[in-house]
Image (spheres, rainbow, N blue to C red):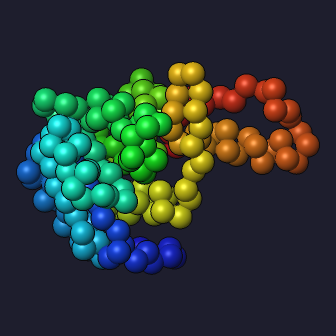
Amino acid sequence: MEGQVSLDLASLTFLLVEDSAYMRTIIRTMLQGFGARRIVEAEDGASGLEAMDRANPDILILDWVMPILDGADMVRMIRTPNNPFAYIPIIMVTAHTERSRIVEARRLGVHELLSKPISAKALYQRVSSVILHPRDFIKTATYFGPAPREIRNRQKIWQGGSGGPGEKADVTSIG
């Protein structure tokens, strides 16, 4: 990828949870092309949760629509403060990119949304983002997950003196 830092992904473990064997092959092949060597696969959310315990992944790439336990349900189970994987970066893959889906992904605590059809460039950008720009986690009465980018950016504004901490952040999108 031109003009970008080349990441060494060989030391990271990826968990790829996707019900389509075809899509798993595409994503695995792209990750291998980026240098990833440890890629664990699962075909639904239930087996994905089991694989997490075995694989201890660094990054979770997860399809939204799957049988048995879908991606949203899996994220809800992971994003609880007492889960050992509560802080794992999650890249959610979906063909449904309407605004309501994007807002729901943010509310679930997803780091990045990747729309189908997937391009190698888009996947690399999402993986790079979760590695190079880690986000603090926040816990409120209704949310546990990565701080939405708008809040993080607005805190920089607060430090600069314009605006104030009482100001409500507009957190309506993931990116």
Q: Residue at x 32, y 76 (%)?
A: 10
Q: Position of residue 101 (x, y in %)?
A: 38, 28
Q: Residue at x 41, y 50 (%)?
A: 88
Q: Position of residue 15 (x, y in %)?
A: 26, 55
Q: Residue at x 9, y 52 (%)?
A: 22
Q: Considering depth in this image, is 53 or 116 the residue closer to the camera?
A: 53
Q: Residue 148 vs residue 97: left or right?
A: right
Q: Quadrant of residue 1?
A: bottom left
Considering every residue shown, the one lying at the far right of the view is 161
Would residue 36 be seen by someone viewing this image from the given angle? yes
Q: Quadrant of residue 140?
A: top right
Q: Residue 84 vs residue 81: left or right?
A: left
Q: Residue at x 85, y 47 (%)?
A: 159
Would residue 113 be seen by someone viewing this image from the given angle? no
Considering every residue shown, the one lying at the far left of the view is 21
Q: Establish if 88 lies above or below 125.
A: above
User: Number of labelled discs?
Assistant: 0
Q: Position of residue 27 (x, y in %)?
A: 22, 58
Q: Position of residue 169 (x, y in %)?
A: 69, 30
Q: Establish if 21 lies above or below 103.
A: below
Q: Considering depth in this image, is 109 or 6 the residue closer to the camera?
A: 109
Q: Establish if 118 lies above or below 148.
A: below
Q: Residue 1 vs residue 153: left or right?
A: left
